[in-house]
Image (cartoon, helix red, strand yellow):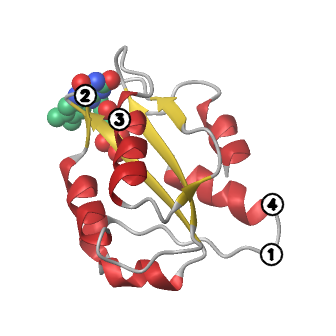
Amino acid sequence: MASAVAEGTTESGNVECVIEKPGEMHSDELTLLDTILFGAPNHNQEPARNIMKFMGRATILELDQKIGAIFDTYTGGNKGVAASKLEAMVKKEIPCIKIVVQSLSARVEDRRGPLSEGEIERALAFG
Ligand SMILES: Cc1cc2nc3c(=O)[nH]c(=O)nc-3n(C[C@H](O)[C@H](O)[C@H](O)COP(=O)(O)O)c2cc1C
């Protein structure tokens, strides 16, 4: 999902997009970016805990003028549940990041994937 979103961003123009996992990036690095897309899988109707923890550390950073977007993946009937919680978290705890598009929620066929039909195209367009 993240790869398809990243591909979509770079296809849209002169954009460099990097994918980072929460454990591989220091939250301070967010200050160097223009745009931040937060994505998480739905785990028990919540965004995966490691993403929330990472975002918690971002609340103390100077992120004014940044724009952002949110996406999630899910398997069952929980379309958009994790994304709406991520979005609520950003709006409440990191309001200096302006969310500029409607969040994207992509279905995966089972817990190990793959993405359901049509979701890659939606992720590209979202990017
Ligand atoms: C521990 C766990 C809990 C999950 N809980 C839910 C859930 O409550 N609702 C849902 O739609 N999908 C649930 N899923 C499915 C994941 O959302 C799906 O596997 C994930 O989005 C795939 O992305 P990933 O490859 O990054 O893990 C769960 C998966 C795991 C591993």
Labels 1 and 3: the sequence-earlier one: 1
Mark 4–mark 3 CB contact (< 8 Å): no
Which quadrant of the structure image shows residue 111? top left
In the image, residue 70 sits, relative to residue 122, either above or below, namely below
Could you say which disc has been placed on residue 12 in the image? 4
**Three-letter amino acid code of the residue under disc 1:** Asn
**Three-letter amino acid code of the residue under disc 4:** Ser
The tally of labels here is 4
Q: What residue is rendered at 36% in x and 24% in y?
A: 75
Which quadrant of the structure image shows residue 67? bottom right
> Element under label 4?
loop
Ligand 1, seen in the image, is in the quarter at: top left
Mark 2–mark 4 CB contact (< 8 Å): no
**Three-letter amino acid code of the residue under disc 2:** Gln
Could you say which disc has been placed on residue 45 in the image? 2
Q: Is mark 2 within 8 Å of ligand 1?
A: yes
Q: Where residue 76 sits: x, y (%)?
A: 34, 17
CA gap between label 2 and label 3 equals 6 Å
